[in-house]
Amino acid sequence: MRGLSRLLRWAVLVLVGAAIYDQLRRPAAERTWHGRIGFVPYDFRPPTVERLRERLWNPDDPRIFTPHVWGVGWTINLYQLRHYLLPLVERVRAELSERRG
């Protein structure tokens, strides 16, 4: 497990370095500080309340995993996770109540 943790740490450091390099090689006027390295999203802009809502609680976005508000990788759209988990929880509750009653 220690090896996997070390590997993940190195992978994150490499992605952060690649994202920063990607931005710094551009002319200053063209730097956006957000984008993708391969399929991994990054965003180094200062977080805003609007972007927090857009990524963490967005009923209009069907994805459960959305790009981080700040950093490299993904975060969880809690609205969609809730929307996905509620029927499962209700089904388990119904099965448990049938077994008891």
Image: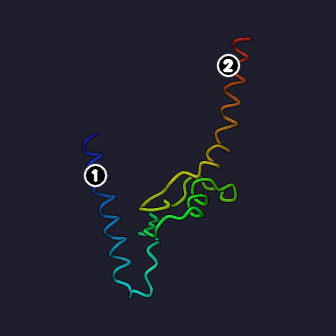
Image point (50%, 61%), residue name: 69
Residue linked to disc 1: 7
Residue 63's image quarter?
bottom right
Tell me, yes or no, whether the two marked residues, 2 and 1, touch with CB atoms within 8 Å.
no
Front position in the image: 95 or 60: 60
Residue 101's image quarter?
top right
Residue 31's image quarter?
bottom left
Image coords of residue 61 (percent x, y): 65, 59
Helix, strand or loop at label 2? It is helix
Image point (28%, 39%), residue name: 1
Helix, strand or loop at label 1? It is helix
* Residue 48 against residue 1 in the figure, above or below: below
Earlier sequence position, callout 2 versus callout 1: 1
Image point (46%, 65%), residue name: 41
Image point (49%, 59%), residue name: 68
For badge 2, the amino acid type reads Leu
Image-based side of 18 in relation to 62, left or right = left
Instruction: Give the crowd class for mark 1: few <14, some 14-19, many >=20 residues within 10 Å.
Output: few
Image-based side of 87 in relation to 34, left or right = right
Residue linked to disc 2: 96
Residue at far top of view:
101
Image-based side of 53 in relation to 19, left or right = right
For badge 1, the amino acid type reads Leu
Front position in the image: 44 or 98: 44
Which numbered circle lies on residue 26?
none
* Residue 17 against residue 58 in the figure, above or below: below
Image coords of residue 51 (percent x, y): 57, 63
How far apart marks 2 and 1 lie (CA) works out to 42 Å
Instruction: Give the crowd class for mark 2: few <14, some 14-19, many >=20 residues within 10 Å.
Output: few
